[in-house]
Image (tube, rainbow, N blue to C red):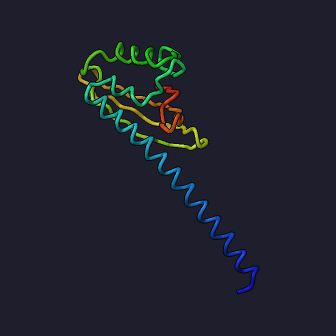
């Protein structure tokens, strides 16, 4: 086999090896993010807002934007959830559908989705955008805009 063909084969093989390993890493990150969102969904439907918040960044820099405008902080966000959803009648049954998930970098993902609450006090629904960041090897929501 000529040297030129061998070099070409090695380059093509390296390209596919690199491409498949980076795709795998992306898939692994997406699976971890989907798992977090599923855990949040389950916690909400069990009426457990404290467990629901585990997917969020536990920091004063967490940004949550809802109908009342921007608020900062993990504790502030949890208090807001508890005020808006004081009992399981107001929490209802939560369904979330991911509409898109885009890798921005090795450290950030942007997620767009739709949420729905089937409730005895009246159904509500809306959309959300989430900015996930990988901090110390763990994906967390650092910004949430829900409408």
Judge left or right: residue 64 versus residue 82.
Answer: right
Say which residue appears at 50% left-offset and 21% top-offset. Answer: 59
**Nearer to us in this view, 147 or 5:** 5
Image: 101 above or below 60: below
**Nearer to us in this view, 82 or 20:** 20
Image: 74 above or below 10: above
Residue 38: horizontal and vertical position, in percent? Answer: 36, 39
Say which residue appears at 42% left-offset and 42% top-offset. Answer: 34
Picture quadrant where residue 49 is located: top left
Image: 129 above or below 80: below
Residue 94: horizontal and vertical position, in percent? Answer: 32, 31
Residue 56: horizontal and vertical position, in percent? Answer: 45, 28
Say which residue appears at 61% left-offset and 42% top-offset. Answer: 105
Residue 132: horizontal and vertical position, in percent? Answer: 52, 34
Image: 34 above or below 144: below
Say which residue appears at 61% left-offset and 60% top-offset. Answer: 18
- In the rendered view of the protein, which quadrant contains the N terminus? bottom right
Q: From this viewpoint, which residue is outermost toward the front?
A: 136
Q: From this viewpoint, which residue is outermost toward the right?
A: 4
The mark tally for this picture is 0
């Amino acid at each position: 086999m000529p040297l030129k063909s061998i070099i070409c084969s090695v380059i093509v093989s390296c390209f596919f090896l690199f491409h498949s390993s980076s795709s795998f890493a992306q898939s692994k990150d997406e699976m971890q993010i989907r798992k977090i969102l599923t855990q949040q969904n389950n916690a909400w439907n069990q009426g457990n807002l404290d467990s629901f918040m585990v997917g969020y960044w536990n920091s004063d820099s967490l940004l949550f934007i809802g109908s009342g405008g921007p608020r900062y902080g993990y504790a502030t966000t949890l208090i807001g959830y508890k005020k808006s959803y004081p009992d399981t009648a107001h929490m209802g049954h939560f369904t979330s559908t991911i509409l898109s998930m885009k890798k921005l970098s090795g450290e950030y993902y942007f997620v767009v989705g739709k949420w729905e609450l089937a409730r005895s006090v009246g159904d509500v629904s809306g959309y959300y955008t989430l900015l996930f960041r990988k901090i110390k090897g763990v994906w967390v929501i650092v910004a949430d805009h829900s409408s």
